[in-house]
Amino acid sequence: MQNEWPPRGSTGFDKYSFFDCGAFGLFTLSDERFQPKAYGKRAYSPSTFFIEREKRAIDPNKVHLWNELGPALRTLGDATTVLDVGGYIGTFCIPLALSAQASGLDLTFHSFEPGPTRELLAINVQANGLASRVTVHDAAMSSFDGHTIYRFKTGGSIGGAVFGNGSSDDIERVAPCFTIDRFCKDVVGRMFIKLDTQGHEPDIMNSARLTISQKRAIWQIEFIAWAARKDIGGQSFADFLLQEFYLFEGHREINALTMPDFLNEIDARASRMADMTLIPRGAPFVENLLAQVRQG
């Protein structure tokens, strides 16, 4: 049966928690500390979801991600390629892909998540009927092409990192890794790139300069204060972004004058981060999109 997992007769559902997110669902490990509570709640068994339950149509207007990023994606238009770097279990690509589909936009998604987390991501993509739209890659993005050690903290969230010092309790996997430039060199058309890599964003973007200059992609990145101050090529990551992009947190624009106070503000937040939208300077669509974002 389509979207049936595990196969009939198998066991193992007790290992997973299923979250009802309205018109879509997500799996995560039952013993995972971080749960996607912002996206939904436990409602029914995984077997019911896969085998019996008919999912209702999604309303893009009720999806936070679509309200936030829909204007940018509509500006880019059909045939846009979306890179979801740090795909986790699908909390970004699934609601966005379903919303785009319901809105009549033909988008292609590539979601990157190495190691054991990728298995849950692939299950979630399949369960939501998105296998033809979302390609799941068992790989990481980094500052070089090759392979890297991907570390998972035991007893924590099922996401991992490709940098930092490991401990004896870490689960380690060897994973392929790519630069953005290598992966994007043959991509035709407009692009949207999302990075959620726990502070690895400066290294990834510093190795994506051809993509930044030639593809004129719109980006959404996890913007962490300590990473924003990191030196890349003789300037801070924050200054590099200001040179290449217009920066927004939601509808709030951050410029060179407000950046120091903004970094101090982020430092004081419990999360110590912000989700930043980066609109490329000089792109043909920039004035139209800037007007939409600034007006809210």
Image (cartoon, grey):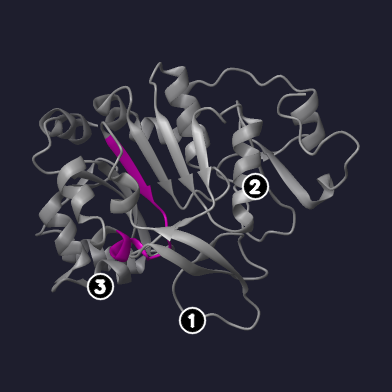
| Disc 3, SS | loop
Which of the pair 144/261 is nearer the observer?
144
Q: Which residue is mark 3?
A: 230
- Give the CA separation, mark 2 to mark 1: 26 Å
Mark 1 or 3, nearer chain start: 1
The N terminus: image quadrant:
top right
Q: Which residue is mark 1?
A: 165
| Residue 197 among those drawn in magenta | yes
| Disc 1, SS | loop
Q: Residue at x 56, y 60 (%)?
A: 159
Amino acid carrying label 1: it is Asn
The boundaries of the magenta stretch are 191-204
| Residue 143 among those drawn in magenta | no
Amino acid carrying label 2: it is Leu
Give the vertical position of 275 relative to 128 (above or below): below
Tell which tag, 1 or 3, sits nearer the viewer: 1
Q: Which mark is residue 120?
A: 2
Mark 2 or 1, nearer chain start: 2
Residue 35 seen from this side:
yes
The C terminus: image quadrant:
top left
Q: Residue at x 46, y 21 (%)?
A: 101
- In the rendered view, does 129 fall on the left or right side of 250? right
